[in-house]
Amino acid sequence: MEIERESGWNLHPIGGETGKAYMGIRNEEKVFLKKNSSPFIAALSLKGITPRLIWTKRTGNGDVLTAQEWCNGRTLASHEMTSSNIANILKKLHRSDRLKRLLAKVGGDTISAVDLIAEYEINLDADLENHPVLESTYHYLLRELPLGYTQDDIRVCHGDISSENMLLSDDGELFIVDWDTAVLTDYLYDIGQLFARYIKKEDWAKWANKNEMNFTENEIKRVKWYAFINMLLDIKYAHYKTRYNKMNELILTLNQWLEDEGIIS
């Protein structure tokens, strides 16, 4: 393998859909290696949000390898995603003006609610487009596009808040990994994704209060909107991956949300 020869490390692929991540081993040393990782990683590692960056190297074919400290540990279980540790690391990410400036500087994408709607619409299978629960949700989202937020609410968001992307080291440090999805957008996008995937709808307000996120009425409407659009996007992804049991489970949950909101009866 070309990058193995150029880097001097024995590479062992790590599971993932991109196929760009490896465990690098040389003598008794281990590092986490990734091809063409976000140049934003250095700033995140300085903040302690992701494991420490050790070096970067450009290979002969133009790829950029990054090496990060190898952390013995594990990803989180789904039930652990309600922890205040998640809220704390997201606050560290969302409140950093420096990270916002740096992601903009390296060309990070800025996305809006309209972009998320467009992401759902593109190549949408007819079975999903005509499903009554999904159609009702889609029209609700069009009617309730989140408004009333400012440039200061535009923050760095990870964009894929999942238990697989939360690494708990053996020393008890929590890191967020896999930053290919990082964007500049309303910071409540990440919170909405967390709510959609891991926190029961009846517990959203309780979680926010426990973690001192005193949402205004406008923020409550926005975070709810992002939870609903993330549910649609996760359903679309499950359908694409032919994970129909998961897809149907999500549709049932979404149907209950719509009933709770009085959108359908």
Image (cartoon, rainbow, N blue to C red):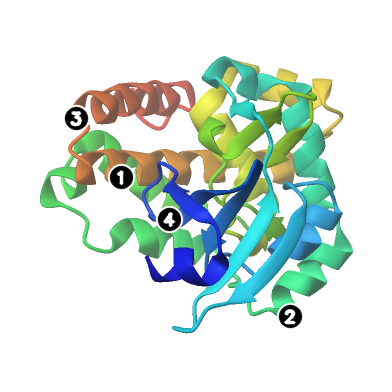
Q: Earlier in the sequence, mark 1 or mark 2?
A: 2
Q: Earlier in the sequence, mark 3 or mark 4?
A: 4
> Does residue 249 sit above or below 187 in this rendering?
above
Q: Earlier in the sequence, mark 2 or mark 3?
A: 2
Kind of residue indicated by mark 4 = Leu
- Residue drawn at 57 percent across, 39 percent down: 165
Which of the two marks, 4 or 2, is nearer to us in this view?
2
Point out which mark residue 105 bears. Answer: 2
Which residue is labeled 4 in the image? Answer: 142
- Residue drawn at 72 percent across, 65 percent down: 55
Q: Residues within 10 Å of mark 3 (few under 14, many from 20)?
A: few
Q: CA distance from mark 1 to mark 2?
A: 31 Å
Which of the two marks, 1 or 2, is nearer to us in this view?
2
Kind of residue indicated by mark 3 = Tyr
Please tell me whether mark 1 sits on a helix, a strand or a loop: helix
Which residue is labeled 3 in the image? Answer: 244
Q: Can residue 215 be spotted in the picture?
A: no
Kind of residue indicated by mark 2 = Lys
Figure quadrant of the N terminus? bottom left
Which of the two marks, 2 or 3, is nearer to us in this view?
2
Which of the two marks, 4 or 1, is nearer to us in this view?
1
Residue 121 x, y percent position in the rendering: 30, 60
> Does residue 72 sit above or below 92 in this rendering?
above
> Does residue 163 sit above or below 50 in this rendering?
above
Which residue is labeled 1 in the image? Answer: 237
Please tell me whether mark 2 sits on a helix, a strand or a loop: helix
Q: CA distance from mark 3 to mark 4?
A: 26 Å
- Given contact means CB atoms under 8 Å apart, are the residues at marks 3 and 4 in contact? no
Residue 172 x, y percent position in the rendering: 79, 24
